[in-house]
Amino acid sequence: MEMAHRDHILAAVHGVLGAAVLILCLAAELSVLVLRRHAALYLLPVCAMLTHLWRSGRRAGIGLVDFAYLKPPRRLRVTIPGLLEHLRLIGCFDDGSVEFMSRVVEDSGMGDETYFPPALHYLPPSATHADAVQEAGMLFFPTLDELFAKTGVPPSAVGALVVNCSGFGPAPSLAAIIANRYRMPTDVKTFNLSGMGCAAGIVGVDVARGVLRAHAGAVDYAVVVSAEIVTIGWYRGRDRSKLLLNCFFRTGCAAALLSNTTSAAAPVKYRLVALKRTTIAADDRGYNLAMREEDDEGITGFTIGRGLDRVFRDLLRAHLTAFGASILPWHEKLRYAAALARFRRRRRSSKKVQGGEGHVEAPRPNFLAAASHFCLPSSGMPNIRRLAEGLGLGEREAEAALATFQRFGNQSAASLWYQLGYHEARGRVRQGDRVWQLGIGSGPKASSALWERVAAYGGAAAADEGPWGDCVVRYPARAPGAPLA
């Protein structure tokens, strides 16, 4: 049955139920007034009316059935020494650019097991449209094959498909490429998100949630695919503000199957507890700091300007205030409010005594009261540690992000699912635990999703599956002399 027909039937059923409740109310009124029945008869239509209103206004619960993430072929692996030699042999970079990228890569903490797409292994790299389309197929199809096999849900049952990829927007779209490959039904709702950076994965979940709720009973499953086509993002110029993407971004892909928990048959692994999106695109200072543009030689690249840390700090302050209010338990909200009041009093008294700005450290909410596990933006190990410290988290809470960046590099929005896979591979996510995924992207924007594990722990056999199965115990590797967690 087509989705439009199902929506029409469900609307008709709701209309019939509403009419039946109205008739029941009129019958009760006549029975009491004309036939002199007991007034308690009013309870029957009142209960029916309340039940009908409750069911009509109830929002469908959103669950994560399962997810899959790609381990690229070993032949695409690129070591740090191999990458640095590759940069020197390409011929399009001067010595200063090679030295700059070498320093950035070495300081980032990236390991020797990340992956480049086939086109970037050539000398010189090939970054054509055809190469990017080939990379898209190499990423999408194995990942989705695994997802459908793991969940047992066929592509024909998918009612919505959301694909996010920031830098590549072909025609037909990436969503159309997937729908064609898997012969998805004619009424599947497809969405293609671009230019939204590392925050796009949660944005995709939000879009899928909206479709599942708007078409509850007609759309049972939605697939969200997150990937970055690195081929098309390769920059071959000399502008240092555009060279950073060459250093950090690597090949990867993830796909998640979401469901409407009130109508879908497949059991869910996680329940979506909360989701929040924040953007400060109206601020020109932040808007212009990260954008795709041409350099002075006409070569297109992605610019990362100075002052990005300050902009992201303001963005996170606004985002965490809104998201924290929805996820923190009441006892933590009260504790933080009391600590904040004491902090303001101490700061005022300190200013009076010293005649200037007092050096009193501001309190922070305890986000460990809201989540047990964290998936953070994979923007280099030093940046991950600074972000974790700002959130009041320790090395263990940042471990998944550190390990993912070291093993796979920055895979944009897909990195959050690799981190969730790391938590599962370590056997840490148990029933009732909550996982916080935080993404930050260009715009600038921040997005967060809080998931609660509802399925029982799958045991060691399930934890050994996936790209982390053969290497999870080796990450995050620490440099000699580095402090332990």
Image (spheres, rainbow, N blue to C red):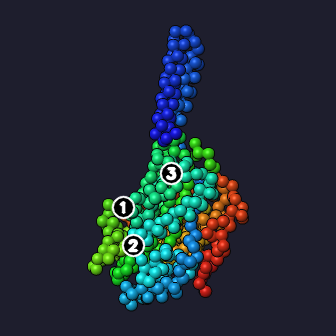
Pair 3/1: label in front = 3
Residue 120 at x, y percent in the picture: 46, 78
Q: Does dot 2 land on a helix, a strand or a loop?
A: loop
Q: Which mark is residue 280?
A: 1
Residue under label 3:
184
Check if mark 1's residue and mark 2's residue have beta carbons within 8 Å.
Answer: no
Q: Going by the image, does 440 lie left or right of 303?
A: right
Identified at 56% across, 71% down, the residue is: 72
Residue type at numbered disc 1: Ile
How many discs mark residues in the rendered view? 3
Q: Is residue 471 visible?
A: yes
Q: Which mark is residue 191?
A: none
C-alpha gap between disc 3 and disc 1:
37 Å
Q: Does dot 1 land on a helix, a strand or a loop?
A: loop
Identified at 36% across, 61% down, the residue is: 280
Work out whether 121 lies above or below 141.
Answer: below
Q: Which mark is residue 128?
A: 2
Residue 334 at x, y percent in the picture: 53, 55
Quadrant showing the C terminus: bottom right
C-alpha gap between disc 1 and disc 2:
33 Å
How dense is the environment of label 2, judged by Cα within 10 Å: few (below 14), some, or many (20 and up)? Answer: few
Please report whichever mark, 3 or 2, sits nearer to the chain's N-terminal start.
Answer: 2
Nearer to me, 256 or 363: 256
